[in-house]
Amino acid sequence: MMQNKVKWSQIALILLLIVPGGKYLSLPAALAQQVGKDSWIVIAVLLLLDAICLAMTIKAAVINKHNLSFNSVLTNTVGAVPSKVIYVIFFVLLQMRIITLMASVYKLFAATFTIRSSWVGFWLPISAFCLLVVAKGFKTIARLNQLLSVLVMFSLVSILIYPATQLDVRNLLPLPQSDFATILQGTFNSTFWFADYMFLFFVLDSICPSRHPYVSVMSGFGVGAVLTVLMNVLFIALYGPLAPYTDLAMSKVSQFALALNTNGRLDWLSLSVWTTSVFIKLALFTFSAYKCLQFLIGNKQLKFNYWIGAIVVVFSLTPLFLSSDKLLKYMLPYTVYPFCVVQYVLPLFLPLLVKIANNKHDKRIVEKLNLSEVAANE
Amino acid sequence: MKNKSKVPVAQQYLKDLQSAYGDSEDFRVRTLALKPEVVVVSLDTMCDDNKISHCVLEPLLCLAQQTLSADIVEQKLSFAVKVTKAVNYEQMTELFFNGYTLIFIQGESKVVCADTRIALGRAVMEPPTSIVLSGPREGFVEDVKTNLTLLRKRLKTERFKTVELSVGKYTNTNVTVCYIDDIVKKDVLEEILQRISAIDTDGILDSSYLSSYLESHRTLLFNRVGSTEKPDVVCGKLLEGRVAIIVDGSPMVLTCPYLFIEDLQAPGDYHQSSDITSVSRVLRFISVIVSVFLPAMFVCLEKYNYQIIPLKFLITVLNATEAIPFSPLTEMLLVIVIFDILREANLRMPTAVGMSLSLVGAIVLGDAAVKAGLLGAPAVMVGALSGIGLYTMPQNTLVLSLLRLIFTFIGGVMGLLGVIIGIMSLIAYMVSMQDYGVPFLAPYAPAIPHDKQDAVLQSPLARQHKRPQSLNNTHNATRRGK
C-alpha cells in the first residue's frame, strides 16, 4: 500500500517547481498594471500567506492518522451538502486556473516561438498529456516532477543569471511606491493566481508519513517562493515603467540572457525546458479538478474514468468562445470571495476538521468493536 | 488428455503408451526376461543409446538372479544415472518425452524413469550478443542443464535454489526458476512461480515467449523482463535479489524484476575501473538521448524555430538544403527509413557479404542522394549519427528506432510544443510502470539515493556495501558482514 503513496520530499519538489511555474507569464504585467513597481511586494505578501496555509495543510496531513480523504473529512465534519458546495467552488477555481494557464502558454508559444496553431490544435496534445498523467495517478505526477526538477531549475537559473547582472535597481525605487491600501487591494485581487498548495487537499490520503515533513516541504516551497519574488524583482528592475505593457515576462526576460543573437536563440531551449514545469502544474490542476468532479458525480471507483476525464478537459475549450482575459474580467469580481474561502480560510481550519473527522472515525471503530463483541456474547 | 491416474498398475500405463505413441518410428520397446518381466521403453531420438545400454540395460541384466521391485531397480540404477519414479501417467509421459527411459516392472504400480537424455547442442562459447573486452567469455547454451552448471560453478552455496516447472501443453518445456534463498524477496518469487504455473498455452519455444507472461500488465515498447546470455551477469543479478528463469532450448536467461537503468549497464562494466564505467555510461546515456531526439529537434528547428540555430551554422544548413525538393520532415523520415532498411538487410544478409554490402550501401546511397540533390548532407549526417547511437543500448535498438520515428514525425508536425509534450508523455508513461512492486525508472523516479551507486554513474564495487533498495529485499540488504 505504501508503494502507492508519495513521499513528502516529492511534494516538496512539486512545490519547488509549480510555485514559480506559471507565475512568470501574464501575472507580472497584470500586477504591474494594478500596483506598479510594488508588484513584487504583493507577490511576497501572497506567498507568505500561502506559506501559513501550506503549514496548516501539512499539519492536517500529519494528524490524519486514519488516512481519511479530503471528501470524507468534509462530509464527516461540515456535512454532505456544504462539502459538495466547497467542491463546486474548487472545481470552478481549478477550471479557471487551467484556462488562464493554458491561455498564457498559448500566448507564450505564439509570441516567442512564432508557432501559431488553432486553440484546438494547441489544446489537444496538452489535454491528452494531462489525461494520461491523471489516468496514471498522482504518483506519476510526483515522479515525473522529480525527474524534471533538476533540468527545470537549471534552465531557470540559466535564464535568470545573466539578466540579474543587467538590472537597474533605480527602477525599484521608491519603496514602496503605492500606498498600503493599494497594495492590500492588489493583494486581494491577485489571490486567484496563488494558493498552489491546493492540490494537497486532494491527496491528503496518499502521502507517506514522515518524521519531519515541515522541513522538506517548507524548504521546497521557500526556494520556489524566493525564486518567484526574485524573478518579479528582476522583471521590474529590467523593464521599469514598461513593465505593465510587457506581457509574458519569462519570454522577455530570457532575451537578456543572450549577449548576441547571432549565437542563436539558445534561451528558447531553456525556456522550453522551463515550460515543462507549467505543464506539470496544468496536469496537477487537471488531477485536482478530476477528483472534484469524481466526488460531485458520486463516482467511487479507484480506476480512472475516461468520461469524467473528458468532461474535465473539455472545459478548457472555453477560449474558443470567450478569451481567458474576458473570462477573468467577468467572473473574478464575483468569484474572488468564495475562492478566497477555499484558498485561504479552509486550510486554516483544516487541521481542526481533520482532527474531528479522525475522532469520529475512532468512535465508529469502537462502536463497531462493541457491536461485534455483543454479537459474539449473544 | 485421458486421466489414467487412478489406474495403479504400470502395465496399464505401458499399454496406453504403446497405443498412443507405438506407431512412432523412434518408439523403442525392449523386453527383458527377468523375474518378473521388465519392459524398457525409450525414444531413440531423445535418448543416448550408450547411456541406455551402460546405465540401464547392463545393471538390469546384472539383477537377473534377483526378484525385482521398483525400489531395487531404482537403487541399482541410481549409481549410474538420475532415477525418478513416476506416480501417474502424465508425469511419466512428460519424463518420457524429455528423454527419460521408462522401466515397467510387471506387477508394480510405479514406473521407474532413468535420465538418459542425449546431450545435444553446441559447446559453451562467447555469446555473440554480449562480447566483452575483459571479463568471463562463457555464454549460456540451449541446454538447461549446462546453463544450471554455469550458474552453480559461480554460486557455490546451498542457498542457491532452483524450482523446475513444466510449461506448454504440447512442448512441456522445462522452465527452471533460480534464486538465492536468503536474498530474494519471497513475495516476488511466489508471484513469478504463480505466473509461470498459470501459463496455459500450446508451447514455449524460447524464453522470449515467457516474457509476456511475466509482465503484470501489457506494456508498450519497453522490456519489462531482463534477458542475458552471460552467466556472470545472471549471478550478479541473483546476488542483488533478483530471480532468474532458464527456459530449456533458449540461451537467453530471463531476470526479474527489471529496471530501465539495466539497459545502460553492459556486462563489461564490472570488469573495469568504476570511473571508466561511469564515463562510458554517461556516453551511452547521451547517445540514446541524441539518437531518439536529435532528428526530431533538427526537423523542428529547421522547419519552425531556425532562430535557435547559431547564425553561421544556420547559413551552412540553409545552403545545404536550399535545393532539396522535400520538406525537412520528409527528408529526415527518408533518411531514417533508408537507414532502417539497411540495418534490417544487414541482419539478414550472409555474414560474409553483410558488412561490405551495408557499408557500400550506406556510402553509395548517402553520397548519391546528396550529390543528386535529393537529400541534404546535414540530414544524412544527423540521421546517421542518430542511427549509430541507437546501438549503445543494443537490447532496445528497435524500440529506440521506433521512438525516433515517432518523435521526428511529432517534431515535424507540431514543432517544439509537440516534442516537449511528447517527451513528457513518454517519461510519464515510463515512471508509471511498475512490476513486482519495483518502479521501472528507479533509482531516479522515485529517487532512491542509495541505488545511484550503480546507475548512470558507478561507485567502486568495493564501496557498494548494500544491495539495491529498489528491489525491496529489506531482510538481507547488506552485501558484507551481518
Image (cartoon, grey):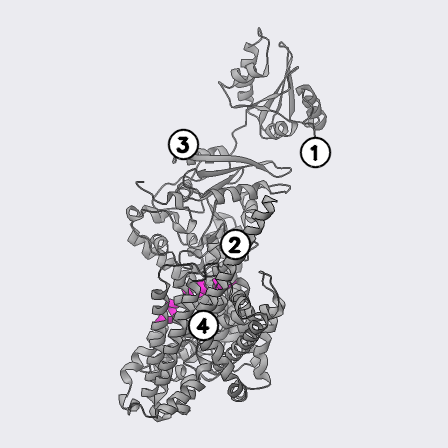
**Could you tell me which secondary element the residue under label 1 belongs to?**
loop
The CA span between labels 3 and 1 is: 38 Å
| Front one among B408 and A167 | A167
Left or right placement of residue B31 versus residue A210 in this view: right
Q: Residues within 10 Å of mark 2 (few under 14, many from 20)?
A: few
| Front one among A186 and A253 | A186
Taking B401 as reference, is A47 above or below it? below
Please, what is the three-letter code of the amino acid marked with disc 2? Val
Name the front one of labels 1 and 4. 4
| Front one among B322 and A111 | A111
Taking A4 as reference, is B39 above or below it? above
The CA span between labels 3 and 4 is: 60 Å
Where does label 1 land, which residue?
Answer: B1
Left or right placement of residue A80 versus residue B314 in this view: right
Taking B191 as reference, is A188 above or below it? below
Q: Identify the magenta region.
A: A137-154
Disc sitting over residue A349 in the figure: 4
Q: Is residue A141 magenta?
A: yes
Precedes in sequence: disc 3 or disc 1: 1
Mark 4 vs mark 2: tell me if same chain: yes
Where does label 3 land, which residue?
Answer: B158
Please, what is the three-letter code of the amino acid marked with disc 1? Met
Precedes in sequence: disc 4 or disc 2: 4
Name the front one of labels 2 and 1. 2
Disc sitting over residue A366 in the figure: 2
Residue A357 horizontal/vertical position (percent)? 50, 64
**Could you tell me which secondary element the residue under label 3 belongs to?**
loop
